[in-house]
Image (cartoon, rainbow, N blue to C red):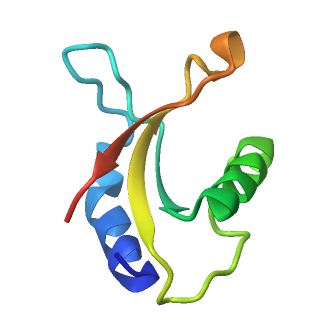
Amino acid sequence: MNLTDATRVREKNISLIGQTNDLGFTVDDVIVVPIEENKRKEFMNDYLMDRSNINVHYDDNEDFEVWAVDLKNLEESGRIFYSILLD
């Protein structure tokens, strides 16, 4: 989806923050992530440094996903857990 659609999906799902599912996945943030691998790596490095997903500018016609992220295990395992949100 393009950036406009991804932003709309993020805003629609922002209320998920703080919710926990039956498996213990807690939504700590809802972020818009580029699909292209190099841009995703750059974005994730920036995001994990300052927990911000608005500091990088992209073209609207690039492809994006919206992730609900659980950050609680990040410091312990070095891995971020996420679930892709669809429109």
Q: Residue at x 37, y 34 (%)?
A: 18
Q: Residue at x 39, y 58 (%)?
A: 66
Q: Quadrant of residue 68?
A: top left
Residue nearest the viewer, comparing 9 with 83: 83
Q: Quadrant of residue 73?
A: top right
| Above or below: residue 65 compared with residue 4 | above
Residue nearest the viewer, comparing 39 with 67: 39
Quarter that holds the N terminus? bottom left
Q: Residue at x 80, y 44 (%)?
A: 49
| Above or below: residue 24 compared with residue 53 | above
Percent across and percent down for residue 78 are 69, 20
Percent across and percent down for residue 20 are 29, 24
Q: Quadrant of residue 5?
A: bottom left
| Above or below: residue 25 compared with residue 83 | above
Q: From this viewpoint, is residue 52 visible?
A: no
Quarter that holds the C terminus? bottom left
